[in-house]
Amino acid sequence: MARYIVDKTQQPSGKHIIHNLNTFCPDVPDSQHQKMLGMFPTSRAALREAKKHFELVNGCEKCSRDSYVP
Ligand SMILES: [Zn+2]
């Protein structure tokens, strides 16, 4: 299990990126821009949770590759 957050700031594409906090990902936003999602076994599960909050979401290319869509 790993702890995931979603970036409250949308990317130029309109998507909100999820990050795995257990990976020390360099692209994790400052804490005031993070929305905590919780603990999930996979980034795909975290992405499903993030979709409850934001319409357009994507996995981070660096830390959530199994849900990253180019
Ligand atoms: Zn990341």
Image (spheres, grey):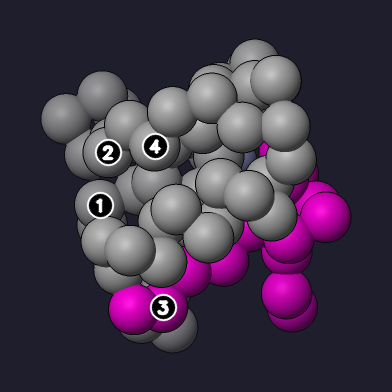
Q: Residue at x 61, y 32 (%)?
A: 40
Is the residue marked by circle 4 packed among few (<14), some (14-19), or many (20+) residues within 10 Å? some
Which of marks 2 and 3 precedes in the sequence? 2
Mark 2 residue element? strand
User: Do labels 1 and 2 touch, CB within 8 Å?
Assistant: yes
Residue matched to label 3: 56
Residue matched to label 2: 35
Is the residue marked by circle 1 packed among few (<14), some (14-19), or many (20+) residues within 10 Å? some
Q: Residue at x 65, y 21 (%)?
A: 2
Using residue 16 as the reference point, say whether residue 63 is left or right of it: right
Is the residue marked by circle 3 packed among few (<14), some (14-19), or many (20+) residues within 10 Å? some
Mark 3 residue element? loop
Mark 4 residue element? strand
Query: What percent of the width, then of the height, locates residue 28?
Result: 48, 33
Question: How far separated are the C-alphas under marks 2 and 4?
Answer: 6 Å
Query: What percent of the width, then of the height, locates residue 39?
Result: 54, 25
Numbered label attached to residue 8? 1
Q: Which residues are magenta?
A: 55-70
Membership of 58 in magenta stretch:
yes
User: Do labels 2 and 4 touch, CB within 8 Å?
Assistant: yes
Numbered label attached to residue 37? 4
Question: How far separated are the C-alphas under marks 1 and 4?
Answer: 11 Å
Q: Amino acid at mark 3?
A: Leu
Q: Amino acid at mark 1?
A: Lys
Which is more foreground, mark 3 or mark 4? Answer: 4
